[in-house]
């Protein structure tokens, strides 16, 4: 019985492959859909790994891997509904320089603890405008594109000096809905997203102060990645003010 069933499955699968149906199913995300957790379960997992990062059960690099894996499982449509992107699009005017930032209230979700352990917001830009290049100290973040198209660049912050950073390009690619990236002090610390569609929105989760040994506050450190090219693909990127950064890249 089992053998014949297996045989049948193999044959059926063979036919699907032959007719190109497997590919069609995959491309329509039907297989993936069936294993996606509900958005509430997904949020609970996010709370869990955020707590593990803060509780030093995960290193920042381990956290980044887990967060990226978790982001890949999210039901994007449910996330968009959860954060009420429609309302934000209607209410929030996208700025002529830089990005809008909107908070997200998760109190309506049943069963979530009062302290969820991570900050979250939505950034929005209109075409040609950017979340300007910057890094953070003692902060991990995860970005996932909710809507629109972006060009995203990331750099490792190899050295931190008073007047400049030594940075190394790590990511330079097109980001579409569902695409994601994470940062920490040790990987892809500098991020920069430029909207290339009429409007574009990113969901962001951030965890501040995850390592008591790291000095400095977690606020944005602005820089100009268009700095002197050094050996080994490195760049000496001067620190600049928010104003100068927005003037050049916003
Ligand atoms: Fe940031």
Image (cartoon, rainbow, N blue to C red):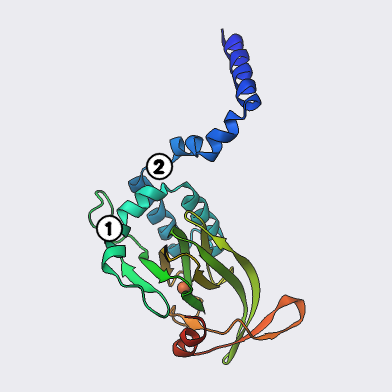
Residue 152, compared with residue 69, is above or below; it is below
Residue 128 as seen in the image, left or right of residue 93: right
- Residue furthest top in the image: 1
CA neighbours of label 1 inside 10 A, class few (<14), some (14 to 19), many (20+): some
**Nearer to me, 247 or 213:** 247
Label total for image: 2
Location of residue 236 (image quadrant):
bottom right
The disc label shown at residue 37, or none: 2
- Residue furthest right in the image: 231
**Nearer to me, 139 or 109:** 109
- Residue drawn at x 55%, y 67% as measured from the top left: 152
**Looking at the picture, how far across and down is residue 204, in whole percent?**
41, 64
**Looking at the picture, how far across and down is residue 3, in whole percent?**
61, 11
Residue 34, compared with residue 146, is above or below; it is above
Whether tag 2 and tag 1 are in contact, CB under 8 A, the answer is: no
**Nearer to me, 178 or 97:** 97
Q: Which of marks 2 and 1 is nearer the N terminus?
A: 2
| Marks 2 and 1, how far apart at CA | 17 Å
- Residue drawn at x 50%, y 50% as measured from the top left: 72
Q: What element carries label 1?
A: loop
- Residue drawn at x 60%, y 24% as measured from the top left: 16
The disc label shown at residue 106, or none: 1
Q: What element carries label 2?
A: loop
Q: Can residue 232 be seen in this view?
A: yes
**Looking at the picture, how far across and down is residue 4, in whole percent?**
60, 9
Residue 54 as seen in the image, left or right of residue 232: left
The disc label shown at residue 30, or none: none
Location of residue 123 (image quadrant):
bottom left
């Amino acid at each position: 019985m089992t053998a014949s069933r297996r045989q049948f499955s193999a044959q059926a699968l063979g036919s699907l492959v032959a007719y190109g149906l497997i590919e069609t199913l995959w491309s329509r995300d039907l297989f993936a859909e069936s294993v996606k957790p509900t958005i509430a379960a997904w949020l609970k997992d996010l709370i869990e790994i955020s707590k593990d990062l803060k509780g030093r059960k995960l290193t920042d690099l381990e956290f980044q891997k887990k967060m990226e894996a978790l982001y890949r499982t999210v039901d994007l449509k449910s996330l968009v509904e959860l954060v009420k992107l429609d309302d934000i699009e209607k209410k929030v005017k996208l700025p002529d320089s830089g990005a809008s930032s909107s908070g997200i209230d998760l109190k309506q979700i049943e069963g979530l603890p009062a302290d969820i352990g991570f900050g979250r917001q939505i950034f929005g830009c209109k075409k040609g405008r950017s979340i300007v290049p910057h890094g953070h100290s003692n902060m991990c973040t995860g970005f996932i594109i909710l809507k629109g198209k972006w060009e995203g660049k990331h750099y490792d912050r190899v050295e931190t000096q008073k007047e400049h950073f030594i940075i190394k390009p790590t990511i330079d690619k097109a980001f579409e809905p569902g695409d994601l990236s994470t940062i920490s002090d040790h990987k892809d610390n500098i991020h920069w997203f430029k909207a290339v569609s009429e409007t574009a929105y990113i969901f962001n989760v951030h965890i501040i102060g995850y390592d008591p040994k790291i000095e400095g506050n977690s606020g944005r450190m602005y820089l100009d990645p268009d700095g002197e090219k050094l050996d080994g693909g490195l760049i000496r990127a001067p620190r600049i003010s928010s104003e100068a950064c927005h003037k050049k890249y916003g």
